[in-house]
Image: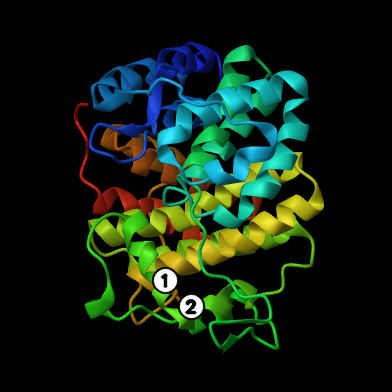
Amino acid sequence: MRTPLYAPLDDALDEIAPYGIELKNGNSNHAPMVAEVLCALGHPEAVTPWVARYRERMQLRPAPGKPIRGGEWRVALGRRDRFADWALFFTAELEDAPWGAVLDRWVGRLASGFCAAATHGPIRVGHAVRGLAERETASRRRELADALAGWAATWQQLPASGANTNGIEAPHERMPPREAITRVPIVPAERRLPGNIVQALAILGDFPAFTPIVDAIDTTGPVAPQIAELTALFARVFLANAHDIPTTIAFIHAVTSHAALGNIAPFVGEATARAALRYAWQSGCALYACYGGDRAVAETIAATDAGEDGLVERALKNGDEHVIKFTEACLSRHAIAPSPAYLAAADHVALMIRPRRAG
């Protein structure tokens, strides 16, 4: 891959700033994330044209309403209508403290809602953090404020066990993730809810068999190797289960959310990163519970003839936000901890999502 080049990022973020976290169709706004990804891929020339095509799909952010006070933030969690209020709140937070301190405090507080907006909450934070780590600017601090605001406004908590919840005991023995993913209970087809991922995950509140899975793996060891292991594992889950548009989109997020945590973890404390890892695992399992089939992971990986540069060029030509972001996540994680699953997954995604020629 090319050397990352971030020259156009601030201008792109300034252009995107007036818009909210949702598109006109109600889906998540990917523009700031894709702008950062194109820079990370070393294709700065693609940023402005891509954002220009995407702009007509974006929706202006709402006006702020009631300010969120420091001691009252919990009641505003998960309130999409409070996004603008959250954005002002985090802008003030970032004015009062270094961005790393704000990030550590709030990732810790928001971690239990890791599946926010189908994991777009932490994913956008991960891209904002990587941009800030490259260079700290006012535009990139504002993007971190908006990213954290999006996570807080869409915060969604999945059912989790401590010792005993809903009559289902937490596992007495932790399992390797490769084994644990095969133990995730699958929501029966007749109980699955139509609609988007957020709506699909809602069924898990009435599916007590899922509750213990958050504690099925041991997250007490070093965080970075565990992020690497889980990201590669969910790339294999993607390969085994992405067979149409809904399943492809769902399992893309199981990978990109863990990759985003990989961007966040070096800039927060170990306890914060470990808490987020626990819920990242849970969110990936939730996607498998709601969209998975009989086979949890791809055991054998077919080799791909496309090299890394070829995969990038194919993603850029495809133009879809998910294809671009997923390809970059796979290749960046492959550079950190190589796995054939990443190259195969990046090859597969462009076959599953049709090219987006405009807007």
Tell me the kind of residue under disc 2. Phe
Q: Are marks 2 and 1 in contact (CB under 8 Å)?
A: yes
Residue matched to label 1: 204
Where, quadrant-wise, is the C terminus in this rendering?
top left
Give me the C-alpha separation between circle 2 and circle 1.
7 Å
Residue matched to label 2: 210
Q: Residue at x 74, y 41 (%)?
A: 104
Which of 62/279 is in front?
Answer: 62
Does residue 229 lie above or below 209 as drawn? above
The answer to whether residue 1 shows anywhere in this view is: no
Q: Position of residue 181 (x, y in %)?
A: 52, 76
* Earlier-in-chain disc, 2 versus 1: 1
Does residue 10 lie above or below 85 as drawn? above
Q: In the visual, does 47 lie left or right of 170?
A: left
Q: Quadrant of residue 276?
A: bottom right
* Colouring rule applied to residues: rainbow
Q: Position of residue 86 (x, y in %)?
A: 54, 31
Q: Position of residue 27 (x, y in %)?
A: 31, 41
Does residue 36 lie above or below 251 as drawn? above
Which of 236/19 is in front?
Answer: 19
Label 2, residues with CA under 10 Å away: few <14, some 14-19, many ≥20: many
Q: Residue at x 74, y 43 (%)?
A: 266
Helix, strand or loop at mark 2: helix
Q: Quadrant of residue 174?
A: bottom right
Which of 209/228 is in front?
Answer: 209
Q: Which mark is residue 246?
A: none
Q: Position of residue 287 (x, y in %)?
A: 42, 65
For the image, the number of numbered tags is 2
Q: In the visual, does 89 lie left or right of 154?
A: right
Tell me the kind of residue under disc 1. Leu
